[in-house]
Amino acid sequence: MVLNHTLKFCALSVSLATLIAGCSGGSGGDDEDQDALSGVIKIESGSRIDSDTADDFRLGLAQSNDTPGNAQTLPGTGVVAGYVSATSGTYPASNPGEAFQYQADSTDNWSVELSAGDRVALQVFPEGTGEKPATRLDITRDGRDAGCTDCSGDPPFVYVVPDDVTGPTGHTLTIVAESGGPLRYVLTVSTRGAASAMNVSYEHGDFRPGEAIVQMTPDPPASGSFRVSAQAMNAAEARHLGRGLWHLRQASAQRARALTGDARVEAQKETLKWIRTLERTPDIEMAEPNYLYRSQAVTPDTNPLYELQWHYPLISLPTAWQVAPNAGFGVGIAVLDTGLFSTTPSSYGDWHPDLAGNVPATNTRITDFVSGTLDIDEDPDADPDNPGRDKNPADPGDGQRQSSTFHGTHVAGTAAGIDNNLGIIGVAPFVRLIPVRVLGRDGVGSSADLIDALNWAGSQSDIDVINLSLGGLGRSQGLENAIEAAFNNGKLVVAAAGNQGSDQLTYPAAFDNVVGVGAVDGAAVRASYSNFGGSVDLVAPGGDATRDANLDGNADLVISAWGDDSVQPPQPNYAGLQGTSMAAPHVAGVFALMKEAAVKKPLSPGTFFALLKNGELTDNVGNQTEYGAGLINALKAVNVVRDGTVSTVMGASPSALQFSSGQTSQSLSLTVYPENETVTLGSVEKPEWLSFQPAIAEAGVAPVTLTATVDTSMLEQDRLFRDRVLISYGNQTSQDRVLEIPVSVQLGEQAEERNAGRHYVLLVSTGTEQDTLQQQVVEARDGRYPFSFAEVEPGEYFLVAGTDTDNNGFICETGEACAEYPVNGLPEPIAIGESPVSGVELTTSFRRPTVESLGLPRVGFKGYRLLPQDGNENEPQRRVERSE
């Protein structure tokens, strides 16, 4: 469809007043009803924009914020997007005649009042025009250095206000581009206990094209009959994963291994369309992609010396061995990973000598679950119904002869290495080690294989704890169901919290009944890469190659077992790694020590959570946001179970309540640990403007879920309120305990203060070649953006808007504001006929909805293309939506 471009792209070398009147396409005046399309774009609360973006420089409208004296102001729970660059230059031209440029702007300053526990996070997104930018975040409090230890190096940077800071205190946040080209940034400020505030990009949980996992209701009794009906769903293959879950392969799909680049992205988009049709199929309760999970380790460094295992004294492990000399004897640890190093990987046995004595001598069970193109071993005894699956969990390497990963061997060595005076020792050296292979080529595995393995491991009587040093961004309902089943069957599941240095939830660590483990260095300081927030229940040594925090002259790497397949036959070896993958097996091993030592009262997963929430397993090493319940302490953990007394503890989910003008109610779940225990409630202290339904009554039994609601009429507008809820509770063994739930309410703000930056409003074609057909520019007015298009040819269009802070010709990139009709992340065509369409509403934000909100990942999206800056409306446009 070719349209008349009735509204041209303005050259914008005009004054601000002219810009608003002449280029906004109308602002709700007398002629609004005559416009073909009109509406308003609302702005998310707390949004602010850098006053000297590259777009501002282009227009001559930049206002300096280069010094603390002219710092811009942020609200107490704000989010700001901006631009910095140490250099000036021109972006590579995508179309003839284009000249998108960027200007040098090395420093931005922001001022904000912060209280104890508040969190500042800076994320940066380089445009990639040349030299990688180097950045840092300087924070001063009352004019003096605030002492941020994680504000330089590789972003994101995170700073949590120390508990000794009293009352709201003035802070200056200075973002510095030390070198390199342009970058976009997002700076977020959130309160203590806040949920993820860093979801400023669409979560790209990778998944296998042409495959899906479905939950059937009821579960078909006969596999053969379901495979016949699966053909009607365009499925060429159907494999039962247990508990009503099935793995389907799309009939028309190419093999994933053969797809790369744009072809893979397009195949994933087609897969999502297929999954949406499956969701509408009768008897299918749930359909989701076959997500890919990856190991959570980085930076190998070969070193076999036991004395370099600095991470054991850090958690008081040597003393714990004296208290529990049986060191986990009889307890089963299943390591679901890449398998185990063997000198003869084509057959079961011949394991790494530091592990062999703890692995069952023979095996009659399927313990290699890797299937499809991710599988790179060859076993003549593989299961004919499930190609690739067999009874040999040996790790054949990753297919790259000079850089093979033996990730599972390293993890197993930390959890269960034998004390044989040969190399390393594990946390629980006398346990029974059950290696299970779920990660294959390049350390990647699929959720279908992982779910199948978890369903199996959760049903095995000789397995007590399951270690998952793996993660992915996709939240899988099928995976959560398998974890719940394992938990209910008495298996503790421990998982790595992820290495993105973010508070975005990472699964499986973020699931409720999983122990998510973050990583610290040799000084018990959060490793720069370690995730925090809702994915972290506690921390353990994971190492940090950039630090020598314990001053032993070596980088803080975790030393464990490894393999060398550059020679034949492969030879056992040792390596130092860093990652939350390395932290998780410390906790799995400590649970094994506790399980064996708990002679007075059996140790269940629920009891472990009760002890954890009660602070009886950890040392307090920092704020809860970064460290969860603290650093695992093996001695405390063993001592508390030997005593046999386990206090009953009540926890809240979420752990903090946050409200705003747009969200005045929130669901709150109260959970009692250990499982099957009950508590009665005593007094309840709460602010008078907060109520619960059902009401929390004294001497009552704790409700499972309730709704918390704020009466905003009792509060002043334009303020941030902080308070807490204190619920006392107890039972026969645990009296006078108190659950504290922080509460924050950000009510409104002056409407004119909301500003997400200059917005480009686009009408985009819905065809295969999505082109920008019309474009206008609007500025914020009273906290919103009125817009209108005077003439639009009848048809269907995508209506989108956003900022171009780095002036590269694309809006809605990560780090920029974006609004899509009707909902961000789920754009749908808007129909325009002969009659005017008015009253259209969108909301713009620097944040992006999570996969959980979207239902399915958004694949390949990078931004929408603007019309040329030279004003030539007839110049042909390329595709609007860029693929990664």
Image (cartoon, rainbow, N blue to C red):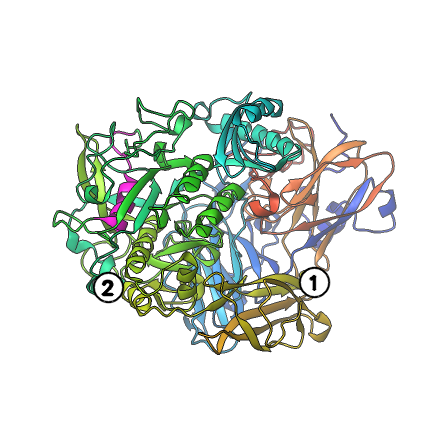
Considering depth in this image, is 514 or 403 the residue closer to the camera?
A: 514
- Disc ID at residue 245: none
Residue 404 covered by magenta stretch: yes
Quadrant location of the N terminus? Answer: top right
- Please determine whether, in this image, residue 381 is positioned above or below residue 162: above
Badge 2 amino acid:
Ala
Residue 403 in view, yes or no: yes
Give the secondary structure at mark 1.
helix
State the image quarter where residue 666 is shown: bottom right
Q: Which residues are magenta?
A: 400-417
- Please determine whether, in this image, residue 247 is positioned above or below residue 103: above
Residue 230: percent from left, percent from top:
58, 25
Q: Residue at x 70, y 70 (%)?
A: 712
Query: Disc 1 versus disc 2: distance between alpha carbons?
Result: 60 Å
Which residue position is annotated with label 2? 320
Considering depth in this image, is 469 or 816 the residue closer to the camera?
A: 469
Residue 868 in view, yes or no: no
Q: Residue at x 51, y 57 (%)?
A: 187
Residue 89: percent from left, percent from top:
48, 42
Badge 1 amino acid:
Glu
User: Along the polypeptide, which appears first: circle 1 or circle 2?
Assistant: 2
Residue 784: percent from left, percent from top:
71, 55
Considering depth in this image, is 133 or 651 the residue closer to the camera?
A: 651
Neighbour tally class for label 1: few under 14, some 14-19, many 20 plus, Cα within 10 Å: few
- Please determine whether, in this image, residue 72 is positioned above or below residue 34: below
Label 1 vs label 2, nearer the camera: 2
Which residue position is annotated with label 1? 752
Q: Residue at x 43, y 65 (%)?
A: 613
Residue 652 covered by magenta stretch: no
State the image quarter where residue 821 is shown: top right
Q: Residue at x 44, y 51 (%)?
A: 487
